[in-house]
Amino acid sequence: MEFERLAKWLPRIEQEIARSYSEARRSAGSTPVADALAVLQEFTLRGGKRLRALLVLAGFHVVTGLEPGPALSAAAGIEHFQSWMLIHDDIIDHAEERRGGSSVHRLLATQHGDERLLGSSADYGVGMGITLGDLQEPFTVDAVLRSQVPGPRRLQAMNEYVRMTRETAYGQLLDVRNGALPIDRVREEDVMEVHRRKTAEYTVAGPLRLGAMLGGAPPKLLADLESIGTDLGVAFQLRDDVLGAGLAEADIGKSANDLIEGKRTLLVVTAWARADPVGRALLQEVLGNPAAAPARVRAAQELIRSTGSLEYSEHKISELSARAFERIRKSTSLRPGAKKLLEQVGDKLVHRTM
């Protein structure tokens, strides 16, 4: 199966996501709960590449060589999981927007004001946002349990979901802690551990393994997918960091949200380690400062380039992706067609511009 053929499942993924919300809203009746579910539905269907959902389908196909319909429900479920992570991330990061619209907690804060409810609109938005994020988990669990495969495979996939969720939470915990540390106390390994535990697990390795388990994968193949998925997942996040700092060639002069949000990325940690006192003062001025002057933000971007930090991140991306592709080629548990699909998936993950 080629990636383009896999991508033809995207409309059915969207339909399955919409079905799950519509079913829940009908069950809730005409209540504030149904209104809150409508917010979740709009947010999840607002956009996204659905890469994680496609990786669940890819994992199933890699094992079986069959059309991945039996894993469709679980593929939609991983998008519920993604919404859960994004809603909570936006609260932690005080983000105002997501996917071209208001973040969920900001949208709910606005609704609080429009309805003239009592108390603080901001507190209401955060409280409701946390709760709606939590509500995504039962959607995810239900979706995995609806998979059209034998019961033991569903149970194995649920065990993988538990592992993936725990590792993602560990990664998020470490990410929040890194953000609270002075930049000179954050090491490269601290950043990479967050990427391995958080992004790599729930973006690539976990979805691939979950789909493969639904397809009845043997242990050796699952181990191969974990190694391949971890390397590609970390490379994916490093690419995301380059894009988020406005440092891709096509983004020169564009948004540097990750810098003004103060994210402890490999780009920032490496630039700090290599910069002179003047450069470090510049980074301290810009990091975590939404009011930083545009000229100073551009100077910080240039510092990341001039210290060789951007080049170093690109080197790590190339190193990790090359190792993943080598593992794909040398795997004795993957069929030739499966290898081709995974190579195409890896290319989509690493060589992207948005």
Image: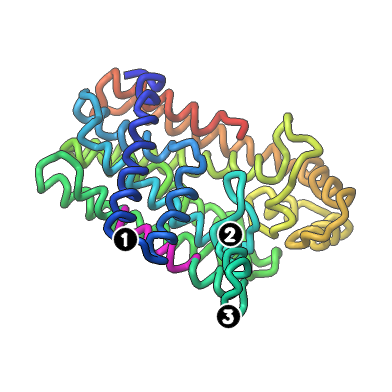
Picture residue at 57% right of the left edge, 55% below the top: 191
Mark sitting earlier along the chain (2/1) = 1
Q: Position of residue 211 (x, y in %)?
A: 27, 39
Q: Quadrant of the N terminus?
A: top left
The residues tagged by marks 3 and 1 sit, at their Cα atoms, a distance apart of 24 Å
Task: Name which residue type carries label 3.
Answer: Leu
Q: Main secondary structure of the magenta part?
A: helix
Please say if 233 is above or below 181. above
SS state under label 1: loop
Q: Quadrant of residue 109?
A: bottom right
Name the one closer to the observer, 222 or 97. Answer: 97
Tell me, yes or no, if residue 91 can be seen here: no
- The foreground one among 333 and 8 is 8
Q: CA distance from mark 2 to mark 3?
A: 17 Å
Residue under numbered circle 3: 118
Q: Residues within 10 Å of mark 2 (few under 14, many from 20)?
A: some
Q: State which region is magenta.
A: 129-139
Residue 217 location (% of width, % of height): 19, 37
- Type of the residue with mark 2: Leu
Element carrying mark 3: loop
* View extreme (front): residue: 30
SS of the residue at dot 2? helix
Mark 1 lies on residue: 29
Mark 2 or 3: in front is: 3
Residue 107, disc: 2
Q: Give whichever of discs 2 and 3 has the lower sequence position.
A: 2
